[in-house]
Image (spheres, rainbow, N blue to C red):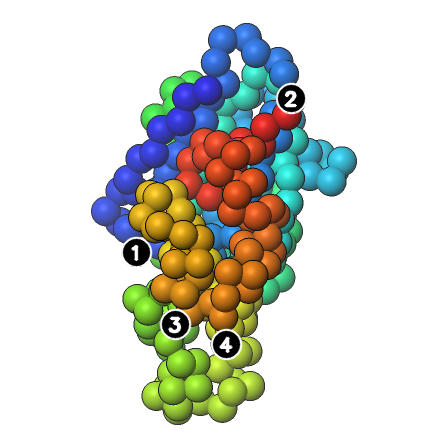
Amino acid sequence: MKYQELPPPSYLKNHVRYFWTLESSGTEHLPHIFGPVADGCPGLIFQQSPNSTFFLDDKQLPDLLLYGQTTKYTELHLTGVFCSIGVCCYPNALKSIFGLNADELTNTCLDLDLLEASKDFYLAEKLSDTTSMTGKIDVIAAFLFNQINKNEGAADDITQFALSRIIQSNGSISLKDLQEQLQLTERSFERRFKQGVGISPKLFSRICRFQNSLAQLRSNNYSKLSDIAFENDYADQSHYIRAFKEFAGFSPYQYQKKSSEVTANFLLMAK
């Protein structure tokens, strides 16, 4: 299995974290199970091999899909020889790129071919007519840039500011203080954040805290699991394990023993 991560062009750097490609090796037809981990980021996946299919809960997924926030453990089953292109976006990209209310896509996805924006751009046709992986990435990048220009002004500066503060603090900032700083009521703050990001500020903060703990776990930068728990403001080790299971589907110990990361936050599950 070959994975590659690519930086976005400069005109997308405020909306896209990176592009990625994933190809199976040889003529392997074995089914694979992937476990996406909650990371606070929506994105796009294009499955360009005609002999492979993504399934979620026994439901076949479209070849070109736009997905929202993932807040719980899910399993993606992929059959056949595959060749995929993905786009990992920043948390508010569904709003800033497509002008969508992000909460409509939380824990789900939609067929990008069904969006008028995709039809107007002839995205499916252009991808079909382009043979190289690099060329297809250029087509997707051009499509995203086209959408950004069309939806100029859709991004919410208040939500962007709140996001940056939460991320910088690894989810430990006081949301009440942040809300007061923004001069918003709790209800208005939560409503705007959900529309822009897809989840509440509290849940996004919890995912940021989980992600920071996951980075420590990956790097083995700890002596005991309780060290990670306390350094990330969990009440105790049990509290941390519960949160880990919520966002990753299994305990930190199982994460280390039973899975491997194809890429960050996208696990290849052991059979």
Please name the residue that numbered disc 2 is placed on: 31
Helix, strand or loop under label 1: loop
Helix, strand or loop under label 3: loop
| As drawn, 119 above or below 168 | above
Sequence-earlier tag: 3 or 2: 2
Helix, strand or loop under label 4: helix
Please tell me which residue is depicted at 39% across the width and 72% down the height of the picture.
Answer: 172
Please name the residue that numbered disc 3 is placed on: 172
Sequence-earlier tag: 4 or 3: 3
Instruction: Give the Cα distance between marks 3 and 2.
Output: 40 Å
Please tell me which residue is depicted at 50% across the width and 66% down the height of the picture.
Answer: 236
Please tell me which residue is depicted at 37% across the width and 76% down the height of the picture.
Answer: 173
Whether residue 168 sits left or right of residue 240 in the image: it is left
Please name the residue that numbered disc 1 is placed on: 14
**Which of the image's four quarters has the C terminus?**
top right
Q: Is residue 139 visible?
A: no
